[in-house]
Image (cartoon, rainbow, N blue to C red):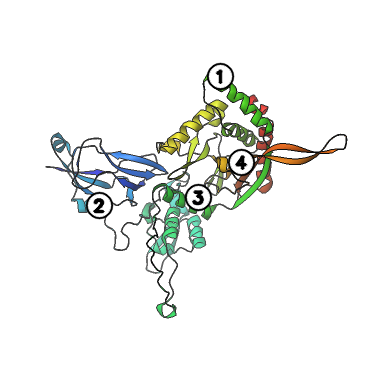
Amino acid sequence: MAQFEFKLPDIGEGVVEGEIVKWLVKPGDQIVEDQPLLEVMTDKATVTIPSPRRGKVLQTVGKEGDIAKVHSTLVVLELDGEGAAQAAPSTGTPAQAAPTLPPGQAGQPAPLQTAGVPRPQAGASASGAQTSAQAAGNGDGRKVLATPVTRRMARELGVDLGALQGSGPQGRVMKADVLAHAGNQQPQARPAEARAPLPAPAALAEDELRPLRGLRKSIAKSMVQSHAYVVPFTFVEECDTAALTSLRERVNAELARRGEAKLSYLPFIARALLRGFDRYPELNALMDEEKQALLVKKEVNLGFGAATPQGLTVFVVRDVRSRTIPQIGAEIDRLAKAAREQKLQLSELQGATFTVTSLGKDGGLMATPVVKHPEVAILGVHKIKEHARPVRHPDGSVGVEIAERMNLSCSFDHRVIDGHIGAAFLYEVIHALEAPELLLMD
């Protein structure tokens, strides 16, 4: 019987690794062609990897939670029947095919670009990057290659570049290497003679250790990156939604008469954002850290946060300008359903230029949403409530008016968006929502 080493295939443009979320087979299992082998997560998408052959599983490489590189061995099969004759000769034994880690590093992610952390925008060529890279000694004779931006990040996070194994060309230390190390390192211990012994905490039977895996691990890394880069500023203002609610009710009544799905408020908000981008295009942009430049995007791709049992997933509605309000609503519904069922494609999770997050019925009074780097702004949508407020009538008398209000909170990257620009942008969006007939004119 011939052996066949199945390697992790290319699972998306620019994807170099994925986290092993769940094994669906084990050594000794007899499998058939196209049978699911395991689930791999990359950039918040869970992908099921099928077997290209039938046979017996001899070995699975990696544990759940480990990071697997593209083109690295995942499964070793003993082929039977016609599959054995088609198998390509193995380049080595299973032990040789699977890279081994030193003791203490087993199960830890490799220092290459971490899953869930977006890579920098394509910019300078490899030769240009090498010219800009700075070499510095680390005390053991080996020189560290890193760009000034990476060095600055390392200083801010307290990371010793000399302790890292770079994942870039010629061993260059990349920003992702610094972020991965900063997320894994522990506080430096004091000398033994200076430490006072700490009492061991009592172990309780009901305590539960929950490793960060899958989507939760990807979210954590994305939040670390936003915290490392973005200087946040949040502006909050209320919006009178009476006219919008009335328009939405009339539109939904007509859609119901036609037998079509009703609309939420989100597609109206999406159209209102377009008016804000028309006046302030720098809000629909991405920050290029390597070039220290703002990339203002012409196409509007809106990310929407969807709560799932695994955690918050942000799906992307592309080219919002070319869609009508019902078309935007239908796409939001389709992608939200796919997110809850874990059926989103990688292309439906990537390429956002601005994000909208809504807590729905739990919207609360206000929140400070976290900007999703490399984007420069995010809009938080809150609960619509009725408020009683005093009003003065033309005759001078004072009465009470019941008004419908919703708070909108917009967070910005203050490095590139000034406060008055962020506020003016949000007021432009609110103006469109308070006069929703404007949305139908576009």
User: What residue lies at 52% left-to-right and 55% top-to-bottom?
Assistant: 228
Query: Callout 1: few (<14), some (14-19), or many (20+) C-alpha neighbours within 10 Å?
Result: few
Dot placed on the residue nearer the N-terminal end, 1 or 4 = 1
Dot placed on the residue nearer the N-terminal end, 3 or 4 = 3
Q: CA distance from mark 2 to mark 4?
A: 52 Å
Secondary element at image label 1: helix
- Considering only vertical position in the picture, is 274 above or below 312? above
**Residue 290's disc number:** 3
Residue type highlighted by circle 3: Glu
Query: Callout 2: few (<14), some (14-19), or many (20+) C-alpha neighbours within 10 Å?
Result: some
Which of the two discs, 2 and 3, sits closer to the camera? 2
Dot placed on the residue nearer the N-terminal end, 1 or 3 = 1
The residue tagged 4 is 383
Secondary element at image label 2: loop
Q: CA distance from mark 2 to mark 1?
A: 61 Å
Query: Callout 4: few (<14), some (14-19), or many (20+) C-alpha neighbours within 10 Å?
Result: some
Residue type highlighted by circle 1: Arg
Residue type highlighted by circle 4: Lys
Q: CA distance from mark 1 to mark 3?
A: 53 Å
Frontmost residue, 53 versus 280: 53
The residue tagged 1 is 257
Task: Locate residue 402 relative to residue 412 in the image: left or right.
Answer: right
The residue tagged 2 is 98
> Can I make out residue 25 in this image?
yes
Q: CA distance from mark 2 to mark 3?
A: 34 Å
Task: Locate residue 260 relative to residue 419 in the image: left or right.
Answer: left
Secondary element at image label 3: loop
Frontmost residue, 19 versus 280: 19
Tell whether label 3 touches label 2 (CB within 8 Å).
Answer: no
